Amino acid sequence: MDSLISAAARALAAGDALEALKRVALREDPPALALRGIAMAQLGEHGRARELLRRAACGFGAHETLARARCVVAAAEVALAQRDLAGAPRELLAAMHVLDAAGDRGNARQARLVAARRQLLLGRLDEAAALLAPLDGQTLPPLAAAVAALATAELALRSLRLAPARAALARGREAAARSGVPALQAEVEAAAAALDQGAARRLIDGTWQPLRLHEVAALLDAGGLVVDACRHRLRAGALQLDLARRPLLFTLLRALAESWPGEADRDALIARAFRIRGADETHRVRLRVEIGRLRALVKPAAGIEATPRGFALRAPDVTVLAPPTDGEASALLALLADGAAWSTSALALALGESQRNVQRELAALEAQGRVRAIGQARARRWLAPPLTGFTTILLLPAALPTG
């Protein structure tokens, strides 16, 4: 490696992309192309960065597996910044093993962190935890230590383990300060702010009361029956019933819980669950069928009784948790709240929905002025203003069961 390449690499490690470009801006050899690509990524020119990294990977010979693996890791990190989640992770994991086998611990660690952050974005928390586990207890350079701490903190927050999250953020704050990278320090502070912001709302006597994360965790640990509209599940002690894939049943459960200890009117239930007005006998029959299915599911924790006017949920204590914002697109807005530009395919992958459904939701939000699009056709990306005053942790998809 010549002196200019070494100097550019040191500048990139320190976060000084412009200094790195001064060293290699006019060079077209593969190492210089790779460094230029990383520098352009640090400057936010992700499209140009991916092109340079592609050229660099092609420029390295088939026998230069180590250099090609480094390009794969760099390109995967740029794709993550672009929220391009469609690529198969196998290539990144293969590159990680190549780097590890060659003794390039720093780049292998970076590949592991990129893979873990990708899994976090997709809500695959078990896979993210498995990727982060080998880094526990290791002495890492400041930059890697800060990124690892951020990923560990998010993993803990998504499962409402607040003490480990605070400890990880404390480590991240210290490592970010040692790294001297202002953007990383700001990211740590933003993550720490989520601990003290509103995370959900609780229905008490017909009024919604805001709750912070530690209050939500305490409520879930208390053992009462909680209908969680943030994660579309019911929790009662050790019982956790996930209804995210059965939205009609969850809608009925939430309506019954919001009416507790009273009854929910039959026609109101039909209008809310089936989204129709002017119910007839066929709708009432369908309601009885769906209530029967719901009754069987919640039987270990509560009962559902028929009343003269409708149905009532029978349990000693019932709590309803709702997202801090109204609307059915809360999870979609939660993903967009990170300020990154997302494609519809990446949003659909993260939410586990069809791309067409996501496009319809985005069109409705755009008409309301809550999101905006940039680019055209396949290059179109979606942005939303950051949500202030509360955290979106509980709205993110596919979280692990709390406990």
Image: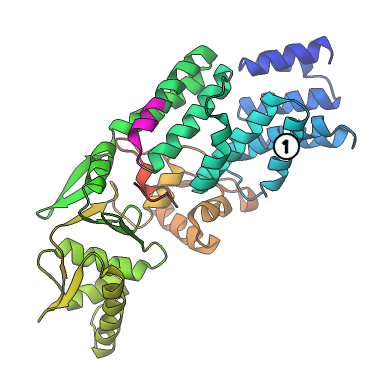
Residues 367 and 278: in front is: 278
Q: Position of residue 147 (x, y in %)?
A: 53, 27
Q: Is residue 170 above or below residue 78?
A: above
Residues 283 and 294: in front is: 294
Residues 224 and 18: in front is: 224
Residues 226 and 393: in front is: 226
Quarter occupied by residue 228: bottom left
Q: Quadrant of the N terminus?
A: top right
Q: Looking at the picture, which amino acid does disc 1 mark?
A: His
Residue 180 visible, this orientation? no
Q: Is residue 187 magenta?
A: no
Q: Position of residue 142 (x, y in %)?
A: 55, 17
At x 27%, y 80%, the residue is 287
Q: Is residue 12 above or below residue 82?
A: above
Quarter occupied by residue 83: top right
Q: Is residue 328 above or below residue 62?
A: below
At x 78%, y 17%, the residue is 24
Q: Position of residue 73 (x, y in %)?
A: 70, 34
What span is in magenta? Answer: 160-167
Question: Would residue 267 appear left or right of 375 to someone viewing this image?
Answer: left
At x 29%, y 75%, the residue is 296
Residue 78 visible, this orientation? yes
Question: Would residue 36 appear left or right of 164 to someone viewing this image?
Answer: right
Q: Is residue 83 above or below residue 4?
A: below
Q: Element type at marker 1? A: helix
Question: Would residue 301 appear left or right of 362 to someone viewing this image?
Answer: left
Residue matched to label 1: 97
At x 32%, y 55%, the residue is 327
